[in-house]
Image: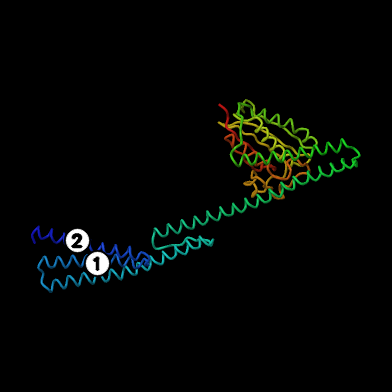
Amino acid sequence: MSGTDLLLVIAVSAAIAAAVGFVAWLLLRRFAWAPIVVHLVTVVVAAVASVVGGVLVATQAMYLSDHDAQIALAIAVTSGVVAILTASILGAEIARAARVLRSAAEDLGRGVPVESRPLPIGEFRAVLDELAASDARIRAAREEVERQEQARRELVTRVAHDLRVPLAGIRAQAEALQDGLAPDPDRYLARIASQVDRLDALVADLFAVSQIDAGTLRLRTERLSLADVASDAVAELRGLADGAGVRLDLAVAPETSTVVEGDALQLGRAVANLLANALQHTPSGGRVLVSVDGAGDEVRLAVADSGPGFAEEDLAHAFEAGWRGSSARSPHRLDVTGGAGLGLAIVRGIARAHGGDASASNAPEGGAVLAVTLPRSA
């Protein structure tokens, strides 16, 4: 066979293969809804038809005898039939794997747990693994949303209670004053003022939490010593601690810079909330220790108490708004923080607004340790 004849055979064979492939492409587009087995068999049939067409062209070009041409054609057709049967069997396996994926996707939509399992095709197995992982993430997110919603409902209930109690007291004492039934008007007025202060503090906490959640907490930063902030807070609450029979101490690491860039008012509020929480849960005769030290580029303020500490499962939730611990962290008779559970959430929000964070742990010797870490000022 001359070179020209060979090129002609190649060109004709390629044209036949292209035509068959184009027809197969049209069929697959027309019947896109068909099962995957049909698609796979169509591809194999197109390949076999292209080969058979090429064989026919070659036998004619090479002037083979009818006997030889029949043998070549029989070989091509037989191989094609076997290939089609093989494609059908393999297609059935692929179809089963696809049905598993479809079932997993339906389970994901219905909220049924999706489990990973071995599949004969690596890509399908990867998709199923990702569906199972997505299901786990969705379930975790749903549980977190439900937990937060439960915490929100509890927070609303506590806030409503904390508002109702002083309002009821104010109403009763005001009515007594109006009716002239108050034996000591000055004492009644003092109680009303105290209840108003309590309401004002609760409203201020709610406002602070809303600012923190919205990311609109405004800071007036300056260079200041975190040790000085802690000292002022300890001085303000020392009388309350003495009245409750709790020893309140301050320890500042010697020769350590505790200077940070911060808002003195907000940091003072955060430290006061930490102290109030510690006093709330420290029994009479116990001790609260405030320590300030620095390591590397950070300044750490920690408040350790000798109370019952946190239950292990509660440590991760200590700084969530509205959260209250289990009975292991039961409130002390000294009512400092109120019942809404906003104080520690405000602490973490203030710390993060300053580029730091807050943490909770239990001391090895017992009691809780709540800490705030802030970047040290250069």
Query: Label 1 crowding class (10 Å Cα cut-off): few <14, some 14-19, many 20+?
Result: many
**Residue 13 picture location, percent across and down:** 18, 62
Choose between 297 and 271: the one closer to the eye.
271
**Residue 354 picture location, percent across and down:** 59, 34
Q: Amino acid at mark 2?
A: Ala
Above or below, 254 against 326 in this view is above
Q: Nearer the viewer, mark 1 or mark 2?
A: 2
Q: Amino acid at mark 1?
A: Val
Query: Label 2 crowding class (10 Å Cα cut-off): few <14, some 14-19, many 20+?
Result: some
Which residue is situated farthest in the left direction here?
Answer: 2
Q: Is residue 283 left or right of residue 4?
A: right
The residue sitting at 78% across, 44% down in the picture is: 167
Helix, strand or loop at disc 1? helix
Numbered label attached to residue 48: 1
Image quadrant in which you'd find residue 12: bottom left
Query: In the rendered view of the protein, which quadrant contains the C terminus?
Result: top right
The residue sitting at 50% across, 62% down in the picture is: 107
Above or below, 61 against 181 in this view is below
Choose between 253 and 185: the one closer to the eye.
185
Query: In the rendered view of the protein, which quadrant contains the N terminus?
Result: bottom left
**Residue 162 picture location, percent across and down:** 74, 45
Query: In the rendered image, which residue does mark 2 sit on?
Result: 15
Please say if the residues under marks 1 and 2 sit with CB atoms less than 8 Å apart: no
